[in-house]
Image (cartoon, rainbow, N blue to C red):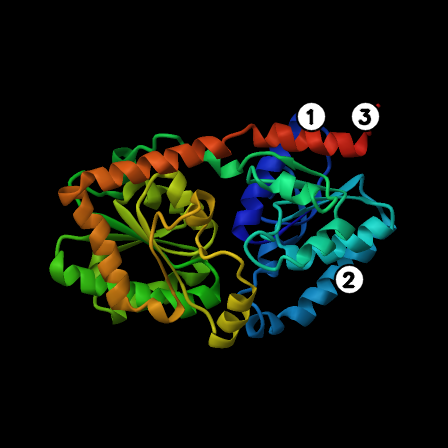
């Protein structure tokens, strides 16, 4: 197995639960993180080695090292073939590896269909050549892949099983030492170094603006250990360090506790939707990377909640539009809605509950069953 970054480690850990239920003595190894290792995974390399940001320039800084790592792993697996190779997300790394392994006669599974419906539609040819089977986390994906001759199974989204249908806001607040009556905003600028570089400062500047009109506002910021010092420094520079609670990880606790979240586009936005929280989605990257990505974009939305709902149910402020003033204004509208237009909040919560229900499946079992059919052909 190869899983990239924190989100891939989470997905792969849940998949391992299903594999271990079906095959208690299963041996798993490759590239992974702590959640996988908790389930007996032998991590030859850590999943954070695959962390990259952007579309061009940022990737080039690491690409030679990633090529060497992929070559070493490929040679090792071909020399001692596993029963199946499972690439979890990280398509830039995994699809090329899967193609070579498949040519060598190794069964390959790709978990999480690349977003060919959002951008880079040409990648469908690579998927067809690389994967014997694709495990899909969104219900519309298998039919789309079938039109291109790719076998796939919808297994639900693992996060829909992890996050409760009715989150306990008050228990989360008690855990963080917040009062029930506090007005709370969770700030999630991303965990990658480049994300913090391009996004975090505008988020904290927006927080400083919000405090001018809402002096009682509380902020919670989940941070991975390697970014904590940098985030603390930004909070001090913006003059809001005394109003910001920086917590180690615990993004789910922060989302459960908040009234609204200012959040970087990515998987975390789906987590916020499953927690039924209003949000303002934002993203910034290097200008050249942004222009290249925009050319590939196939839909008007970037945030997963909007893509899955098929409309702008929450605002997106991207690149040059992501000014502190605009971000602060969008967050303030959600906070005002709690008092002045509560029906707007209730309508969003209902929409996100329906989304949650559509994604809720027994993902570990369905994924393991699909993999079993690949290893032991039926009939």
**Residue, x 46% and y 69% (percent of image)?**
285
Q: CA distance from mark 2 to mark 1?
A: 31 Å
**Residue toward you, 139 or 276:** 139
Residue 378's disc is: 3
Quarter of the image holding residue 226?
A: bottom left
Circle 1 crowding by C-alpha within 10 Å: few under 14, some 14–19, many from 20: some
Is residue 295 shown left or right of residue 204? right
Q: Position of residue 155 (x, y in %)?
A: 60, 34
Badge 3: residue crowd in 10 Å (few <14, some 14–19, many ≥20):
few
Which of label 1 and label 3 is nearer to you? 3
Q: Position of residue 241 (x, y in %)?
A: 24, 62
Confirm whether residue 71 shows in the render. yes
Residue pointed to by mark 1: 22
Residue carrying label 2? 71
Pointer 3 or 2: first along the chain: 2
Q: Locate the C terminus by quadrant.
A: top right
Q: For the point 72% across and 27% down, which residue is it? A: 23
């Amino acid at each position: 197995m190869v899983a990239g970054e924190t989100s891939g480690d989470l997905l792969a850990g849940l998949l391992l639960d299903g594999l271990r239920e079906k095959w208690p003595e299963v041996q798993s190894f490759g590239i992974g993180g702590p959640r996988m290792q908790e389930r007996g995974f032998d991590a030859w390399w850590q999943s954070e080695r695959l962390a990259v940001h952007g579309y061009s320039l940022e990737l080039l800084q690491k690409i030679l090292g990633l090529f060497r790592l992929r070559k070493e792993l490929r040679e090792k697996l071909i020399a001692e073939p596993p029963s199946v190779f499972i690439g979890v997300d990280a398509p830039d790394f995994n699809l090329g590896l899967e193609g070579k392994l498949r040519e060598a006669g190794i069964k390959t599974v790709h978990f999480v269909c690349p977003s060919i419906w959002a951008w880079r539609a040409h990648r469908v040819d690579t998927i067809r050549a690389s994967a014997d089977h694709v495990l899909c986390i969104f219900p519309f994906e298998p039919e789309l892949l079938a039109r291109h001759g790719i076998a796939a199974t919808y297994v639900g989204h693992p996060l829909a099983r992890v996050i409760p249908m009715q989150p306990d806001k008050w228990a989360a607040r008690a855990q963080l030492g917040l009062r029930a009556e506090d007005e709370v905003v969770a700030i999630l600028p991303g965990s990658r170094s480049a994300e913090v570089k391009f996004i975090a400062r505008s988020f904290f500047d927006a927080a400083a603006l919000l405090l001018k009109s809402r002096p009682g506002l509380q902020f919670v910021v989940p941070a991975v250990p390697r970014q904590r010092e940098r985030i603390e420094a930004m909070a001090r520079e913006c003059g809001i360090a005394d109003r910001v609670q920086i917590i180690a990880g615990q993004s789910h606790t922060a989302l459960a506790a908040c009234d609204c979240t200012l959040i970087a586009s990515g998987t975390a936005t789906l987590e916020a939707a499953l927690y039924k929280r209003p949000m303002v989605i934002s993203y910034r990257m290097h200008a050249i990377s942004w222009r290249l990505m925009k050319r590939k974009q196939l839909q008007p939305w970037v945030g997963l909640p909007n893509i899955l709902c098929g409309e702008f149910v929450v605002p997106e402020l991207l690149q040059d539009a992501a000014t502190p003033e605009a971000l602060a204004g969008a967050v303030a509208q959600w906070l005002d809605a709690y008092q002045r237009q509560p029906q707007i909040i209730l309508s969003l919560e209902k929409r996100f509950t329906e989304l949650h229900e559509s994604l809720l499946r027994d993902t570990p079992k369905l994924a393991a069953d699909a993999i079993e059919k690949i290893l032991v052909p039926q009939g």
